[in-house]
């Protein structure tokens, strides 16, 4: 996939691409070999005053009809300084400087990855609060949270249109996952369609669970993996 964005001399670009790649032949697309999530807890001993914490759980892939609901739910957790993880883990308790959650997609499966880096002394509390925020997410998204999230995403889209690199990356990703490129109007309309009801319905059907927790530091942590 070759994705190009910006003010270009299209005939010249097409000529160059044809010259360089015209003799390439397409090959059948081989399916990726994937495995089911293992879940559980893995500790990696490391001599450091810091503890690195990662929590992952299954989600939906980019091409799934519920992807934007899933993305909205993760945005409530970790999109801006008013997001839940930033507020509860960093601002209220001062447990760490860096904490976030993000969506990751393959063609046929998706996941959410959460990360926090903290001191050894505060690592247990950091993990406990992080898991608690994940588990309370299905309790519901509030209108004010969603309004802030939509404003941030819309601002990000505007900035993305000003960056040729960001736009070309997005087009390549769309083509890889969907077989076509979403227009900015399509993306904007899908964001506008997000509501507390649609996100909360998604979370009722797909609550964060089956966690895989990995920590790296001087000592292992206690991990309660049952869903409350």
Image (tube, rainbow, N blue to C red):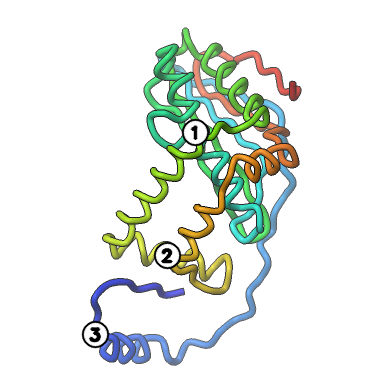
Tag in front: 1 or 2: 1
Dot 1 falls on a residue whose secondary structure is: helix
Q: CA distance from mark 1 to mark 3?
A: 43 Å
Dot 3 falls on a residue whose secondary structure is: loop
As drawn, the residue found furthest toward the top would be 121
* Residue that numbered label 1 is attached to: 145
The vertical placement of 70 against 20, above or below, is above
Look at 48% across and 60% down and name the residue there. 187
Look at 62% across and 20% down and name the residue there. 132
> Could you tell me if the residues under marks 3 and 2 are in contact, i.e. CB atoms within 8 Å?
no
| Residue 43 place in picture, x, y as percent | 60, 23
Look at 66% across and 32% down and name the residue there. 212
| Residue 44 place in picture, x, y as percent | 57, 25
- Specify whether 69 is left or right of 225: left
Q: Residues within 10 Å of mark 1 (few under 14, many from 20)?
A: some
| Residue 176 place in picture, x, y as percent | 54, 68
């Amino acid at each position: 996939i070759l994705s190009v964005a910006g003010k270009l001399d299209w005939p010249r670009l097409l000529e160059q691409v044809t010259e360089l790649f015209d003799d390439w032949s397409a090959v059948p697309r081989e399916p990726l070999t994937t495995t089911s999530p293992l879940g559980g807890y893995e500790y990696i001993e490391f001599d450091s005053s810091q503890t690195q914490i990662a929590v992952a759980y299954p989600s939906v892939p980019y091409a799934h009809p519920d992807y934007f609901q899933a993305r909205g739910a993760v945005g409530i957790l970790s999109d801006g300084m008013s997001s839940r993880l930033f507020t509860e883990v960093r601002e209220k308790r001062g447990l760490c400087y860096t904490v976030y959650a993000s969506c990751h997609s393959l063609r046929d499966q998706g996941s959410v990855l959460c990360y926090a880096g903290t001191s050894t002394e505060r690592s247990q509390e950091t993990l406990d609060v992080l898991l608690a925020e994940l588990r309370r997410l299905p309790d519901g998204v509030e209108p004010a949270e969603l309004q802030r999230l939509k404003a941030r995403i819309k601002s990000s889209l505007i900035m993305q249109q000003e960056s040729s690199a960001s736009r070309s990356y997005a087009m390549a990703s769309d083509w890889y996952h969907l077989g076509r490129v979403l227009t900015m109007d399509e993306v904007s309309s899908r964001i506008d369609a997000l509501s507390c009801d649609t996100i909360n319905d998604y979370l009722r059907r797909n609550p964060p669970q089956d966690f895989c927790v990995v920590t790296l530091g001087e000592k292992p942590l206690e991990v309660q993996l049952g869903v409350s």
